[in-house]
Structures are given as structure tokens and as C-alpha cells.
Amino acid sequence: MERYLVSVKEKMIIFWRKFIIIVSENERRSLIIAASLVIFAVVFSTSAAFAQKTIRQDQLDELVFDALKSDHLIPLDYQMVDKKIQDTKAISIMFSQPDGTSFKNVMTILDDPNQKMMLNRKFYYYPVVYDSETIAKKYKLDPRQVTFIFFHNGKEKNRFVVESLKDLNNEFIPELNRLPMWDLKN
């Protein structure tokens, strides 16, 4: 075993010396190759980060947003929630995972023609799928629950959690209509 390790060590030393000789003889070529590898690594890393965001948005579009049937839900693009809150004077957003009993119950109510007529506003839907822990901490919500938050001038003003309602069928639409508590036209 010791003989084998000595042999490997000698071969590595010989390889390293040959490598140094080749690099020193072809310094310009070696620098071009090294610079090319660095540029390739930077381009690959940047494109991978961009591709991840694009892939996630495409997944949400196909799997979540295409399944939404309600006219009152406006899909909010992945990672755009903060910008939308800051850029919009008044906005109501539903934060929820796109599955679960509460989510299905909310969708059933929103799809009911009788309930639709009573709803007096549209609101945004931000599916809590990716980075759910970060979203939960930032907006102080449980990602497993359906939470509606109203923001005015970028600050939270009112919220309610669907699971806290005692009679979802009778309380949901009135609670959603009450979300903003003042006249936004002023």
C-alpha cells in the first residue's frame, strides 16, 4: 500500500511539473483558456439564476394560475409581491398554498354565481409555493392557511384568516368586502 502511495505521489509530481512547463511555454494560450473558463462560469451562473425564476413562474402559470376560474382573482407574478405592494396605493392580496381544504372552499365560494354578485372588488392571489418560510416570516402568516391582507401605501392596514371564520359560507364575502376600512379615493 505504501509503495502504491509513493508511486501515485511521484506521478502527481511529474504531472504537475509537466503542467507548469506547458503553461509557462504557452503562457498566452493558457491565460486565454483560464479567462474563457472564468467567463463561462460567470455566464452559466447568471443564466442558471435567471432560468430558475423563469421556470418557477412558468410552473405557477401552468399549474396554479391556469386552474383559477374566478374573475375576482388576479394572479400575482412570482417574486413580484413586494414591488406590487410598494407601487400600488391600495391592494388586497390572498396568500395561500394552491391546495388544501380552505383554499378549495374559498375557490368554491368565488366560483358560485350568487356569491360573485355580492363581492365588490378584485384582489390579487400570491401562491405560497416557493420560499414559503421567507414569505411566512415577512408577512407574519401561516402558509397553510388562506390569509387576505390589505395594504395601503405599502403598509399593512387590515387582514383576516379564512380559517378563523366560524361560518365560511355566510361570513367570507362580507369579511372580504370589509377588508379596506376607509375610502381609498381620498
Image: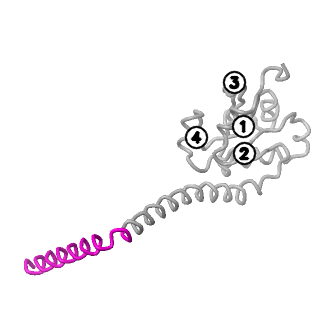
Q: Amino acid at mark 3?
A: Lys
Is the Cβ of the residue at disc 1 closer than 8 Å to that at disc 4?
Answer: no
Mark sitting earlier along the chain (4/2): 2
Mark sitting earlier along the chain (3/2): 2
Helix, strand or loop at label 3? It is strand
Membership of 20 in magenta stretch: yes
Helix, strand or loop at label 4? It is helix
Between marks 2 and 1 in the image, the one whose residue lies nearer the viewer: 2
Mark sitting earlier along the chain (3/1): 1
Query: In front: 139, or 175?
Result: 139
Residue at the (56%, 35%) spot, across then down: 138
* Above or below, 6 relative to 131: below
Residue highlighted by disc 1: 93
Membership of 110 in magenta stretch: no
How far is disc 2 from disc 1 in space, using C-alphas? Answer: 9 Å
Name the disc covering residue 157, or none.
3
Q: Amino acid at mark 1?
A: Ile
Mark sitting earlier along the chain (2/1): 2
Residue at the (77%, 57%) spot, across then down: 66
Between marks 3 and 2 in the image, the one whose residue lies nearer the viewer: 2
Residue highlighted by disc 4: 135
How far is disc 4 from disc 2 in space, using C-alphas? Answer: 14 Å
Crowding at label 3, few (<14), some or many (≥20) Cα neighbours within 10 Å? Answer: some
How far is disc 3 from disc 1 in space, using C-alphas? Answer: 12 Å
Name the disc covering residue 76, or none.
2
Q: Which residues are magenta?
A: 1-30
